[in-house]
Amino acid sequence: MNTSSQPSRPAVRTGPAVALGLVILCIEGYDLFVLGTVGPSLLAHPGWGVTPSTLGLLGSLTALGMPFGSIAAGWAGDLYGRRAPMAVSLTWLSLCMLLSAMAGDLPLFAATRFLAGVGIGALIPLVTAYVSEAADPARHSLHVGTATTGLAIGGIVTGIVGRALLPRWDFHALFLFGVVPLLLVPVVLRLVPARLSGGTPAAPKPHGPGTAPQRPPANRVGQLLTPRYRRATLLFWAATFSGLVLVYGASTWLPTLMIKAGYDLSSSLEFAIAFNVGAVVGTLSAALIADRGLLKAATVVSFLLAAVAMITLSTPQPRAVLLLASGVAGAGALGTQALVNIFVARAHPAHLRGTALGFSLGVGRVGAIVGPSYLAAATALVGSPEAGFYAFVVPAVLGAALIGLLRPGTTGTGSARPQPAAHAPAP
């Protein structure tokens, strides 16, 4: 892939776009981590009969809805612009969280989690594409990375709210906070452009002097599988699978694993908060490194840090060391997936960016579906409390290997400098 696919100069103000993306993903992060936060309370809830396997199934049901949202929203965002799909997704997610808060039995609660997953899946590709198009080319990874830290900040908020309210309050109360996205719909309608920057998709770069620019083919999915993009597309899909096994396995199971290791509920939620603080710090640090032309190296190292952190959490260590390891695990899970999303955004032109992100996250969501059940099976089949932590090591190492296989030219190291000729309007 050539560097012409790199982000162009923003047509909207960068600061408001990054801030809006951060707030939206903060809300999404809250919903992402709320099931893990209420997991111990669900296991103790009278009448529902929730088991560790049921908890894993609930996490998988949430993830099962995400591919539908990711693929549909990514495609719609490229075809119709980011504004309308983003507003619809926020409204959908708010209503589903409200239904979760009102669910009186386990089957209804499970159905609302599946429907919420559709909204969660839709927002990440839309927000990543929107912020990517508004970002300063010289600080592209930092700006997109800052917005994606909203996922981890939402997880921090979930942990703080859970620590304050549980187990004294019923777990349903935590889902009532999910109606906040409705307040952002008017902001989205005001700030997000109705169409892609420039009003029309970017044309491919001409191959010779005097060659007229060509409009991109209508079949965007087919473009992703052409020889120019195929290798990177398949590797991105597989790496996203591995990353989302880590993210959704940890978000659903980390508090429960810490309780199995001998910690009480309050302590386990402290580890969950440390996990998300580490994700914020790790994402921003890695993004700064990535903007120096080291995006691939930063992503590989982040995957490997997740493996080291999970091994450390499985061993008896001083509390301070375990909290630090939780933070490193957050950087290696949530932080790494943010880097993969940045990688996908930088590797594709504007007219393909939403579709590429949507399909990468949509196909990779199989990892989000598998992750919670994979951890549930590991803890059920192996009696040792350490089994759940060791189960995280496999996808972490696999993700590092997959990113390592990307060709050096997948993103241009010179993308920090805008290239006006490549982005001039077509005659």
Image: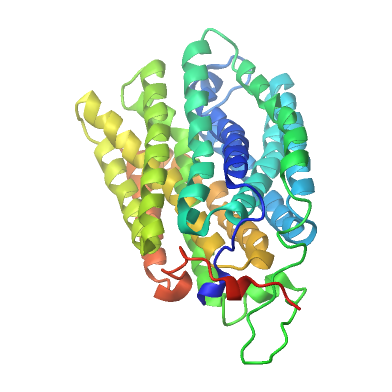
Q: Is residue 406 above or below residue 314?
A: below
User: Horizontally, is 294 left or right of 54 in the view?
Assistant: left
Q: How many marks?
A: 0
Q: Residue at x 37, y 36 (%)?
A: 278
On-image quarter of the C terminus: bottom right
User: Horizontally, is 222 left or right of 162 in the view?
Assistant: right
Q: Residue at x 66, y 45 (%)?
A: 123
- Asked which quadrant contains residue 399, the reply is bottom left
Residue 353 visible in the displayed image: yes
Which colour assignment does the render follow? rainbow
As rendered, which of 242 and 338 lies closer to the eye?
Answer: 338
- The x and y percentages for residue 383 are 34, 36
As rendered, which of 116 and 28 lies closer to the eye?
Answer: 28
In the picture as drawn, the residue positioned furthest to the top comes out as: 168
- The x and y percentages for residue 58 are 60, 35
Residue 383 visible in the displayed image: no
Q: Residue at x 29, y 42 (%)?
A: 309
- The x and y percentages for residue 296 are 38, 63
User: Horizontally, is 38 left or right of 213 in the view?
Assistant: left
Q: Is residue 44 above or below residue 200?
A: above
- The x and y percentages for residue 369 are 57, 47
Q: Is residue 270 above or below residue 383?
A: above
As rendered, which of 38 and 221 lies closer to the eye?
Answer: 221
As rendered, which of 388 and 117 lies closer to the eye?
Answer: 117
User: Horizontally, is 141 left or right of 353 in the view?
Assistant: left
